[in-house]
Amino acid sequence: MNFNANQEQDETAIELTPLIDVVFLLLIFFMISTTFTKETALRINLPEGGSEAAQNEPFTVEVQVGQQSQYAIQTSDTPNAQSLVNSNRDTLIRALSAYKDRESVLLVVRADRLATHEAVIKVLDVAQELDMTNITFATKQVNAEN
């Protein structure tokens, strides 16, 4: 006894409208959440390093910043650091302006860990004002075993 013999069979079909809606929502989500890399305007082909780079070391000017925001300057030429008279901005400008016209100057900022942030920023501001752009910070390497 087949009771369903006269009834039409419903065909199953996949509705595309909800599927398209989900795909568009995923597309919008990925477009919004993706971060794009910033491309540079110029293509730069950097030269390869060799033994010549080690021989041409830049002239080093080291600015030491103490705990009480006092400054001292030591260069590649001088074995001992020379303390500045005071920690005024003008004094620091006069001291560093003697080295700004050299061909390649590396400014090393060696600040005490308890030195104020303001004292370090003052050195960076003066360096920017004097167009000294080759700047690095001296740090102490911490042993991983400690």
Image (tube, rainbow, N blue to C red):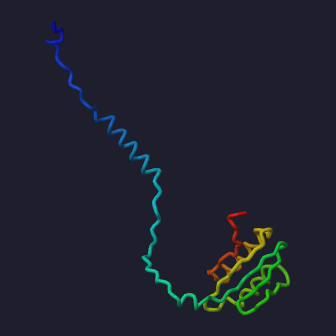
Residue with the most extreme left position: 6
From what the image shows, is residue 43 above or below residue 35? Answer: below
From what the image shows, is residue 1 above or below residue 82? Answer: above
Tally of numbered discs? 0
From what the image shows, is residue 128 above or below residue 116? Answer: below
Residue 80 lies in quadrant = bottom right
Q: Residue at x 65, y 79 (%)?
A: 135
Residue 110 locus on image (x, y percent): 73, 77
Residue 49 locus on image (x, y percent): 50, 84
Q: Is residue 3 left or right of residue 86?
A: left
Q: Residue at x 81, y 75 (%)?
A: 66
Residue with the most extreme front position: 145
Q: Is residue 97 left or right of residue 15?
A: right
Q: Nearer the viewer, residue 32 or 5?
A: 5
Residue 65 locus on image (x, y percent): 78, 76
Q: Nearer the viewer, residue 34 or 126?
A: 34
Residue 1 lies in quadrant = top left
Residue 117 lies in quadrant = bottom right
Q: Residue at x 46, y 63 (%)?
A: 37
Q: Is residue 118 left or right of residue 26?
A: right
Q: Residue at x 40, y 42 (%)?
A: 25
Residue 98 locus on image (x, y percent): 72, 91
From what the image shows, is residue 56 above or below residue 87? Answer: below
Q: Quadrant of the C terminus?
A: bottom right
